[in-house]
């Protein structure tokens, strides 16, 4: 499964001020950029349900020309959730209680469906009295047209266009423009890999679309074509490696099922988590196992 929160956290933490510049440029007018500190991960327990909630990203920054600080709390919401606005208020209240600092709350709604506008406010009202009105910034990607960001040379735009609103027939064009923007930003190889990986995960083309992309590239600027093809080739090589590893997993699980009649899903998941080298070692060790206990003991030794 895709760890959406981790991917978005890594992207925004790496390009934090580029994210702010893209969506909230007014914040740059009153912040000291070099004061940025990312605070440790916050985990809160919901006393009602017993669930543990983890805050995605919490940054401390300083007001410009002041000795006071404030917090920027950012959440990525990868799925539609009922009463999410109440959860944002709970986060706000607990962060306020702990840090005693002003808090600027932001949510990125990154799911594909539904496309109805999301709430950006939590209210508590009685008949003749307003008790609470809590507001936060809502950035709903599936309601943002990718073309609006096409001419904004920003690494966050290059990544997030892959999650914005576009027509089905525009998939190839969107991916091409994401890559074209990426190669013109002149980033270091690690940052290019971060953004290109993000694009490929969220906008993966089928075989026909890949062929169309290649045709489009041949008509592009020569320098751009070479740089984009390097990224595309890297994706293909990683895909082949993943395919080989998945093939090894299937073969080994088939051998285990034949040897021990069957294995449960928990053991299958543990085999799926092995590296290529560990899979090779397991293939050699299978025929030395006398029972499932031997397999479990072997897996325990891999941790």
Image: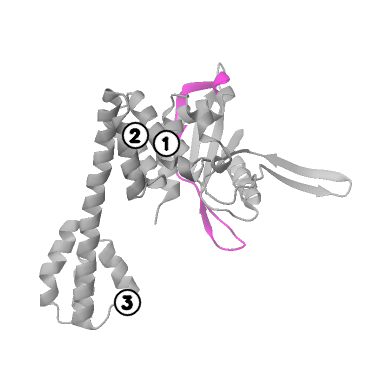
First in residue order: circle 3 vs circle 2: 2
Estimate how packed mark 3 is, as few (under 14), some (14 to 19) or many (20 or more) residues with alpha carbons within 10 Å: few
Q: Is residue 245 magenta?
A: no
* Disc 1/disc 3 C-alpha distance (Å): 44 Å
- The image shows residue 167 at horizontal and vertical percentages of 51, 42
Tell whether label 2 touches label 3 (CB within 8 Å).
no
* Disc 2/disc 1 C-alpha distance (Å): 9 Å
First in residue order: circle 2 vs circle 1: 1
Q: In screen coordinates, is 4 left or right of 280?
A: right
Estimate how packed mark 1 is, as few (under 14), some (14 to 19) or many (20 or more) residues with alpha carbons within 10 Å: some
Residue 40 visible in rendering: no
* Residue under pointer 1: 173
Residue 212 visible in rendering: yes
Q: In screen coordinates, is 300 left or right of 65?
A: left
| Furthest residue toward bottom | 261
Residue 264: mark = 3
First in residue order: circle 1 vs circle 3: 1
Q: Secondary structure at mark 2?
A: helix
Tell whether label 1 touches label 2 (CB within 8 Å).
yes
Quadrant in the picture for the C terminus = bottom left
* Residue under pointer 2: 216
Q: Secondary structure at mark 1?
A: helix
Seen at 18% across and 77% down, the residue is 294
Magenta span of residues: 28-54
Report the front residue among 218 and 6.
218
Q: Is residue 42 magenta?
A: yes
Quadrant in the picture for the N terminus = bottom left
Q: In screen coordinates, is 271 left or right of 54?
A: left
């Amino acid at each position: 499964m895709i760890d959406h929160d981790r991917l978005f956290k890594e992207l925004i933490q790496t390009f934090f001020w580029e994210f702010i510049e893209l969506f909230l440029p007014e914040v740059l007018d009153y912040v000291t950029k070099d004061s940025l500190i990312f605070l440790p991960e916050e985990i809160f327990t919901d006393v009602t349900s017993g669930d543990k909630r983890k805050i995605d990203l919490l940054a401390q920054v300083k007001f410009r020309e002041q000795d006071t600080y404030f917090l920027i709390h950012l959440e990525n919401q990868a799925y539609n959730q009922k009463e999410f606005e109440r959860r944002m208020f709970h986060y706000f209240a607990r962060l306020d209680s702990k840090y005693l600092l002003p808090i600027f709350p932001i949510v990125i709604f990154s799911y594909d469906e539904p496309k109805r506008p999301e709430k950006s406010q939590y209210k508590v009202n009685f008949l003749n009295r307003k008790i609470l009105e809590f507001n936060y910034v809502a950035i709903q990607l599936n309601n943002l047209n990718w073309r609006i960001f096409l001419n904004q040379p920003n690494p966050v735009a290059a990544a997030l266009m892959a999650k914005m609103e576009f027509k089905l027939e525009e998939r190839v064009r969107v991916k091409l423009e994401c890559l074209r923007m990426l190669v013109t930003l002149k980033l270091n190889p690690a940052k290019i890999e971060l953004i290109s990986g993000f694009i490929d995960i969220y906008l993966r083309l089928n075989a026909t679309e890949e062929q169309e992309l290649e045709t489009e590239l041949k008509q592009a600027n020569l320098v751009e074509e070479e740089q984009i093809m390097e990224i595309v080739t890297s994706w293909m090589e990683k895909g082949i490696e993943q395919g080989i590893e998945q093939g090894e997993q299937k073969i080994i699980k088939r051998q285990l099922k034949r040897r021990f009649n069957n294995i449960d899903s928990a053991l299958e998941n543990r085999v799926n988590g092995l590296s290529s080298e560990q899979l090779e070692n397991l293939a050699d060790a299978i025929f030395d196992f006398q029972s499932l206990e031997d397999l479990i003991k072997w897996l325990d030794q891999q941790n």
